[in-house]
Image: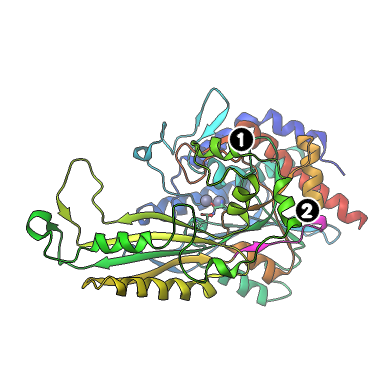
Amino acid sequence: MSAPTAFLDFVDKNADKFIGRLADAVAIPSISGDASRRNDVYKMAAFLDEQLRSYGLETKLVELGDQEIEGQTLKLPPAILGSIGTDPKKKTVLIYGHYDVQPADISDGWDTDPFKLTIDDKGRLIGRGSSDDKGPVLGWVNILEAHKTLGLELPVNLRFCLEGMEESGSEGLDELIESETKKGKGSYFDGVDCVCISDNYWLNTRTPAVTYGLRGLTYFKINIHGPGRDLHSGVFGGTVHEPMTDLIKIMSRLVDPDGTILIPGVREMVGEPDEEEKLIYEGLDYNISDIEESAGSKTAISSDKATVLMGRMRFPSLSLHGIEGAFHGVGAKTVIPAKVAGKFSIRLVPPQTPENVNPLIISYIESEFAKLNSKNTLVLEDLHGGKPWVENTKHWNYEAAIKATKAVYKQAPDLTREGGSIPVTLTFAESLKVNVLLLPMGRGDDGAHSTNEKLDRSNFIEGTKLLGTYLYEVAAITSKA
Ligand SMILES: C[C@H](N)C(=O)N[C@@H](Cc1c[nH]cn1)C(=O)O
Ligand SMILES: [Zn+2]
Ligand SMILES: [Zn+2]
């Protein structure tokens, strides 16, 4: 059963309307990591909830409890659970997505206001969240609108689980899924046959992808404090232990410039690929210029394609993200910061988990700090984490996604593992015991989490057709099975 022409035509004819809706969504700065933006995250939940209801979904907003952030207690954004269709003859597909975004500010180097969707002459829809993940989430809304307006029956039953904390560790969501699942018959997720998540990217700008793996994550903050307040470096330089000096030393001992992780035991947990596995990476439509173009620099860590791809998909990596409390303004302030905090994370791959890696990180940093003989104080904070996930692609869920990709894009997708993390993916796989699929909408150069994030107009429109066609392929394949 291929997608009906009426659906595909509707998507083409309503492209401008869909882009208008994406502009409305981008205009809500739903940054989950910024306490001052929490009202906007709630506002985004209400916006999405209203859209889903207006196209026939029954929804409920589930409260997930409180969160401590920046010294405040805040209500977590709700999970939106939605449902349409209960036909026992149809498969039930659970859709996951997130409505929160990463921080963005024009001063970070954006060419345009990050919260005003700007369409450039190449048809790029530029704005925070356009690709990650408001565009893909609205792709599903577009499908619902098309079916409701055309009076078309959906080919499958749909369940939705949308969250507003994905960019900040998905707090509260695992507990919700686990407690719902334990209810058994009659639980919200009862009867779900497979999961589809559209929240990652193609490897390049040419070839669609179907994704069967994600890296996990463990995110740490290294707090070092000493003096009671910021000091004059002329008066106190050479007289006290400086927190920034300690922090820089510790951070420089986490990772080498060639990407080697220096924490003993971390990299060693992961086995080497055999020749057969290397061939998988060799076979992907990817070259060093793809990474250079999407990174905006000729700074790839290796000139070997498989090495670079495995660096993203197959091995852990440690990134240094930032230092809070450091002097970063203009001018030459001669200050000794009293309190600084360095942030870093490690992307994890099987068999690594935050539980087995965190003790190695903590004992290493504590012993490196002890070697400094500093009288400052070290406090380590584990900010959040998530486990890696790898799925079996020999399943009708993947078959449907591959067929849909061929139908819409007239080419076979790359089968990829994503370097990023979506913490809830493994929870769905383990709790619901069903196959989970990632079906990305955006391209490898979208700049998610970066400045000038964009989603190409064609990816939004063809991506909407892809997600819709996938639902029809699920119905077609499983009715034969
Ligand atoms: C792949 C997904 N679109 C994504 O961007 N996930 C984030 C999750 C996260 C964790 N901490 C902050 N954000 C990522 O991989 O960084
Ligand atoms: Zn993201
Ligand atoms: Zn995302």
Quarter residue 343 falls in = bottom left
Whether residue 199 is visible: no
- Ligand 3: does it lie within 8 Å of the C-beta at label 1? no
Quadrant including the N terminus: top right
Q: Residue under circle 1?
A: 18
User: With 283 as the anchor, is 449 left or right in this view?
Assistant: left
Image height of 470 relative to 70, above or below: above
Q: Is residue 212 above or below residue 221?
A: above
Q: Which residue, given by chain and number where applicable, does mark 2 sit on?
A: 398
Point out the residue furthest to the left here. Answer: 235
Q: Position of residue 384 (x, y in %)?
A: 47, 65
Instruction: Check disc 1 and report its element: helix, strand or loop.
Output: helix
Q: Which residues are magenta?
A: 388-398
Q: Is residue 14 left or right of residue 127?
A: right
- Residue 164 coordinates in the image, percent (x, y): 51, 56
Instruction: Report the mark closest to the observer, 1 or 2.
Output: 2
Q: Position of residue 162 (x, y in %)?
A: 59, 56
Q: Amino acid at mark 2?
A: Tyr
Dividing the picture into quadrants, the one containing residue 320 is: bottom left
Q: Amino acid at mark 1?
A: Phe
Q: Nearer the viewer, residue 279 or 412?
A: 279
341 or 320: nearer the viewer: 320
